[in-house]
């Protein structure tokens, strides 16, 4: 598969088949993704790979936590800026409305929307769950490095015929994750990711998020 094809076919999948994925396949993806660039070769990422009963136990523990705190605790970082401005605010709203429209869930049906959103904490059914952390001493440059590592994983997954769902929704449950996985205090829990085979029959997986046109995000200069 060409890189361009992997990029074009990568999408955030929110409905997976239960078909198992070999551990060796995930290991291969992670080892290759570790070639992602990082300033000073710091490689600031850590990954906790969950399959089978281990994955199910994290899901169970988060479900139990949600009984008392449905949306978890305050994340250790701002997932979005507190005062999100335009055009970003509209983009975020727009993709959410597009997603729920694929399933025919109207805006006023908040209960059904929340029920679907809760699927995040089950990796949307993916048989493999990854939890990513970064050392607390790291700064903006290293967070960018972590992003490149995540992207590398998602593109390599496509080479194996797999799909992914990067999920910052796990961040509010950092206390549960930390306790279960014995994550050291110096590591900040950033996000999770589901990996598996997409359920192409699920309407939500038909979503194709919009992208700004070239002229909107590129400033071209040809002359001094």
Image (spheres, rainbow, N blue to C red):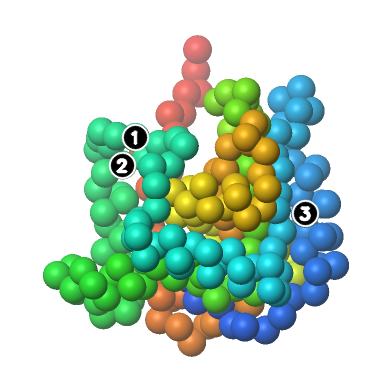
The residue that appears at 80% across and 43% down in the rendered structure is 35
Q: Secondary structure at mark 2?
A: helix
Q: Which residue is mark 1?
A: 81
> Where does residue 53 sit, x and y in percent of width and height?
69, 73
Question: Is residue 145 visible in the rendered structure shown here?
Answer: no
Q: Splitting the image into 4 quarters, where does residue 160 fall?
A: bottom right
Comes first in the chain, label 3 or label 1: 3
C-alpha distance separating marks 3 and 2 = 31 Å
How many numbered dots are placed on residues in this image?
3
Residue drawn where x is 45% and y is 54% of the image: 169
Q: Is residue 26 visible?
A: yes
For label 3, the residue is: 30
- Asked which secondary structure carries label 1, the reply is loop
Left or right relative to 61: residue 217: left
> Which residue is more in the foreground, 3 or 28?
28
Dot 1 or dot 2, earlier in sequence: 1
CB atoms of marks 3 and 2 within 8 Å: no
Q: Residues within 10 Å of mark 1 (few under 14, many from 20)?
A: few
Q: Residue at left 60%, top 47%?
A: 178
- Depth order, front residue of 220/209: 209
Q: Can you give x and y, in whole percent of width and height, for residue 102 in the image?
A: 33, 76
Q: Would you call the spot at circle 3 few (<14 residues within 10 Å), some (14-19), or many (20 or more)? A: many
Q: Nearer the viewer, residue 79 or 95?
A: 79
Closer mark to the observer between disc 1 and disc 2: 1
Q: Quick check: 194 above or below 168? A: below
User: Which one is in front, 9 or 202?
Assistant: 202
Residue identifier under label 2:
88
**Are the two marked residues, 3 and 1, in contact with CB atoms closer than 8 angstroms?**
no
Q: Indicate the position of residue 144 as horizontal and vertical percent values.
A: 59, 33
Q: Quadrant of residue 141?
A: top right
């Amino acid at each position: 598969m060409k890189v361009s094809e992997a990029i074009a076919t990568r999408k955030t999948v929110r409905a997976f088949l239960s078909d198992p994925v070999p551990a060796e396949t995930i290991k291969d993806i992670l080892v290759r993704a570790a070639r992602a660039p990082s300033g000073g070769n710091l490689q600031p990422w850590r990954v906790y790979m969950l399959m089978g009963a281990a994955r199910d136990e994290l899901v169970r523990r988060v479900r139990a936590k949600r009984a008392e705190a449905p949306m978890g605790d305050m994340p250790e970082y701002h997932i979005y800026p507190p005062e999100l401005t335009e055009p970003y605010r509209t983009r975020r709203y727009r993709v959410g409305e597009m997603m729920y429209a694929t399933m025919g869930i109207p805006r006023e049906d908040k209960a059904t929307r929340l029920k679907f959103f809760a699927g995040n904490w089950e990796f949307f059914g993916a048989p493999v769950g990854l939890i990513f952390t970064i050392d607390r001493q790291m700064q903006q440059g290293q967070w960018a490095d972590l992003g490149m590592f995540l992207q590398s994983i998602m593109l390599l997954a496509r080479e194996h015929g797999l799909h992914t769902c990067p999920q910052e929704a796990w961040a509010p449950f950092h206390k549960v994750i930390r306790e279960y996985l014995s994550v050291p205090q110096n590591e900040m829990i950033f996000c999770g990711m589901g990996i598996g085979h997409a359920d192409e029959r699920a309407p939500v997986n038909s979503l194709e998020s919009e992208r700004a046109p070239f002229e909107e995000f590129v400033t071209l200069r040809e002359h001094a």
